[in-house]
């Protein structure tokens, strides 16, 4: 087996732990000595040993003079566990092959530096793209210090998300809706506007799939006009946050529940401030389910990274039927937001289109 084959194995192990290592990235490591695998491991849970520790423990004294393959640059800072770069040095590893550098500018390259200084032969970039695809949200969050934002919309062929009377159940079929729940599972937070809560009274939990993680439910409601009777406040199977303006304590009182938190912002419609607040609360990825007004605000701010569109082969029509992106919109073609389609798939009778801003 060559470097790529061992790195592929490390990537495969890491891919099996995606979601369970939060807020840490999924990482895999393999230790090879004289052409034989003598240690392998993946980071399993935040606060527990990193992938390199598991692999090196399994290798024991065979680690001396061996090669280690890791999907992410070994950590160089004292977190909950001692730095892996130091452990790699102590164990006498001869060569370190790393797929991708840490994207946190504060530590990027430091682990490599430490190992190089200790005389270890280091190499970066083997299967880098595949390794980065393991943790798009974590890498983005470390680099941009704000959540990775996915805008999700389910629409008709003519781009409508509801009829002119507000009906929307259902536009897309079961498979597309199941896929939408997988998006909920993989994101830390799900955000909707007050109008969606009032119109749909959604639960916003991850259902219709196996072991599911519920994202934190976040409602943008500048004047706190939603009802405390809404499902997301009555149902305590997931946390619910309201981001609002400066509203009086008496308005907040009816929402006082264990799983409900209310955050007031000076500018509750400022997407940048909203994302700063969520980043400070450790939200690394945010799924925005709309509706049109909220999607319009994110479009105007251009602070989003991916758009997931589920398109159903139905025509709704009507100039008063809402399209997926409301708000002011752009007046000139030169201002429009360009994306690139990175994935399409057919789900039942519907089409799923995943687009990203260029260079994401
Ligand atoms: N109307 C459609 C969608 N509408 C999704 C809405 O944002 C809202 O989440 C729904 O009311 C579902 O809420 P709950 O969490 O399941 O209770 N999403 C879809 O994928 N297809 C559609 O046809």
Image (cartoon, helix red, strand yellow):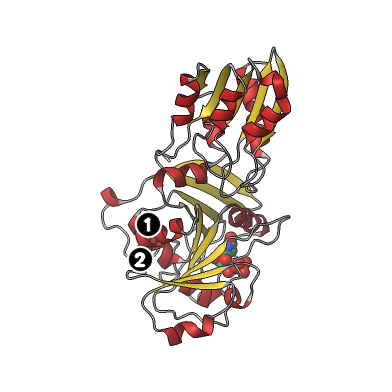
**Residue at point 53% right, 59% down?**
189
Residue situated in front as seen by the camera: 277 or 116 = 116
Q: Is residue 21 left or right of residue 198?
A: right
Marks 2 & 1, CB-CB < 8 Å contact: yes
Figure label count? 2
Q: Residue at x 44, y 30 (%)?
A: 110
Residue at 62% over, 67% down: 238
Q: Is residue 214 visible?
A: yes
Q: Quadrant of the N terminus?
A: top right
Q: Which residue is mark 1?
A: 299
Task: Judge by depth and name the residue closer to the eye, 159 or 132.
Answer: 132
Q: Residue drawn at (63%, 57%), measured in percent from left and top?
A: 181
Rendered image: mark on residue 100: none
With 233 as the anchor, is 226 left or right in this view?
left
Place residue 206 in its image quadrant.
bottom right
SS type, badge 1: helix
Crowding around mark 2 (Cα neighbors within 10 Å: few <14, some 14 to 19, many 20+) is some
- The x, y position of residue 31, in whole percent, is 66, 23
Across and down, in percent, residue 288 comes to 49, 60
Q: Which residue is mark 2?
A: 327
Dot 2 or dot 1: first in sequence order is 1
Is residue 152 at all visible to an observer of this figure? Answer: no
Measured in 3D between alpha carbons, the distance from the residue under mark 2 to the one under mark 1, in whole angstroms, is: 9 Å
Along the horizontal axis of the image, is 92 left or right of 279?
A: right
The quarter of the picture where the C terminus appears is top left
């Amino acid at each position: 087996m060559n470097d790529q084959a061992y790195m592929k194995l490390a990537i495969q192990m890491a891919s099996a732990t995606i979601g369970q290592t939060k807020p840490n990235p999924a990482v895999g490591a393999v230790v090879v000595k004289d052409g034989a695998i003598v240690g392998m491991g993946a980071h399993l849970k935040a606060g527990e040993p990193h992938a390199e520790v598991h692999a090196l423990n399994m290798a024991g004294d065979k680690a001396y003079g061996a090669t280690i393959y890791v999907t992410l640059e070994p950590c160089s800072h004292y977190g909950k566990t001692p730095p892996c770069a130091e452990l790699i040095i102590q164990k006498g590893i001869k060569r370190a092959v790393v797929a991708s550098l840490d994207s946190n500018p504060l530590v990027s390259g430091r682990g490599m530096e430490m190992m190089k200084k200790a005389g270890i032969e280091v190499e970066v970039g083997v299967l880098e793209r595949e390794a980065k695809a393991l943790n798009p949200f974590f890498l983005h969050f470390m680099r941009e210090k704000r959540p990775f934002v996915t805008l999700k919309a389910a629409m008709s062929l003519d781009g409508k998300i509801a009829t002119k009377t507000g009906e929307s159940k259902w536009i897309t079929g079961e498979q597309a809706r199941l896929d939408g729940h997988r998006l909920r599972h993989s994101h830390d937070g799900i955000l909707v506007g007050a109008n969606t809560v009032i119109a749909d009274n959604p639960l916003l939990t991850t259902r219709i799939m196996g072991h599911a993680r519920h994202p934190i439910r976040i409602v943008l409601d500048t004047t706190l006009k939603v009802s405390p009777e809404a499902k997301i406040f009555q149902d305590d199977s997931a946390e619910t946050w309201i981001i609002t303006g400066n509203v009086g304590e008496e308005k907040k009182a009816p929402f006082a529940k264990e799983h409900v938190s209310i955050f007031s912002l000076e500018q509750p419609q400022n997407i940048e401030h909203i994302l700063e607040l969520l980043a400070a609360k450790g939200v690394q990825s945010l799924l925005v389910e709309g509706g049109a007004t909220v999607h319009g605000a994110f479009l105007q701010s251009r602070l989003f990274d991916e758009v997931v569109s589920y398109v159903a082969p139905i025509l709704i029509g009507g100039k008063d039927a809402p399209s997926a992106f409301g708000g002011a919109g752009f007046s000139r073609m030169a201002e429009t937001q360009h994306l690139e389609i990175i994935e399409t798939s057919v789900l039942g009778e519907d089409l799923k289109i995943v687009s990203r801003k260029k260079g994401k």
